[in-house]
Amino acid sequence: MADKPVTKRGRPSKAALQSTKDLSKRQQAAALKDFRARLLLNPKSPALIEKMFEIAFDDEHKQQAVALKLLADRLMPVAGFTSDGKQQAQVSINISGIGAPSGNSVTINGSAGEEEADFEECVEDE
């Protein structure tokens, strides 16, 4: 019998991880796309998801907290709950002269990406 080469399972070695840093962004993106497709097409994926939920809802399981955190991170991303998530910046500019009456001012209001502006200008006749 010929000896088969032993394939290690588990985490990759540090040398193998270092070699991934030499990949271009395009190669990394392609590898991630391939990995994602393999995960989605694996026939055991639904069973894995069911097991994660079982562990998360089992109050007696010693890894319940880990399962809850993983599910929460995937189902409820933090970016959706932060105030700066996808909010656009707003700009407000007030221009007034020194020593001029309070009626002589210009106010410009607008949001980022908008072309709209409101102008108020009062001019007194002398």
Image: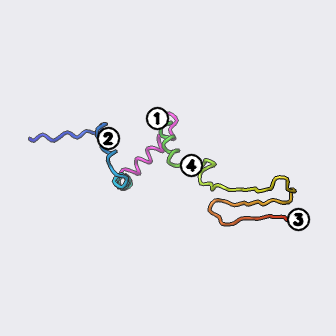
Label 1 to label 2, Cα distance in Å? 31 Å
Badge 2, how many Cα within 10 Å: few under 14, some, many 20+?
A: few
Residue 25 percent location from the top left of the image:
37, 52
Left or right side of 31 for 73: right
Left or right side of 103 for 110: left
> According to the image, label 4 marks what residue?
79
The residue drawn where x is 32% and y is 38% is 11
Q: Secondary structure at mark 2?
A: helix
Residues 42 and 26: in front is 26
Residues 108 and 13: in front is 108
Left or right side of 62 for 76: right
Q: Are marks 3 and 1 in contact (CB under 8 Å)?
A: no
Q: Earlier in the sequence, mark 3 or mark 4?
A: 4
User: Which disc number belongs to residue 86?
Assistant: none
Q: Are marks 4 and 1 in contact (CB under 8 Å)?
A: no
> According to the image, label 3 marks what residue?
124
- Residue 113, above or below 79: below
> According to the image, label 2 marks what residue?
18
- The magenta stretch is 43-60
The residue drawn where x is 51% and y is 40% is 69
Label 3 to label 1, Cα distance in Å? 75 Å
> According to the image, label 1 marks what residue?
63
Q: Amino acid at mark 4?
A: Ala
Residue 42 percent location from the top left of the image:
35, 53
Label 3 to label 2, Cα distance in Å? 72 Å
Label 2 to label 4, Cα distance in Å? 30 Å
Q: Amino acid at mark 1?
A: Gln
Mark 2 vs mark 4, foreground winner is: 2
Q: Earlier in the sequence, mark 3 or mark 2?
A: 2
Q: Secondary structure at mark 4?
A: helix
Q: Which quarter shows the C terminus?
A: bottom right
Q: Earlier in the sequence, mark 3 or mark 1?
A: 1
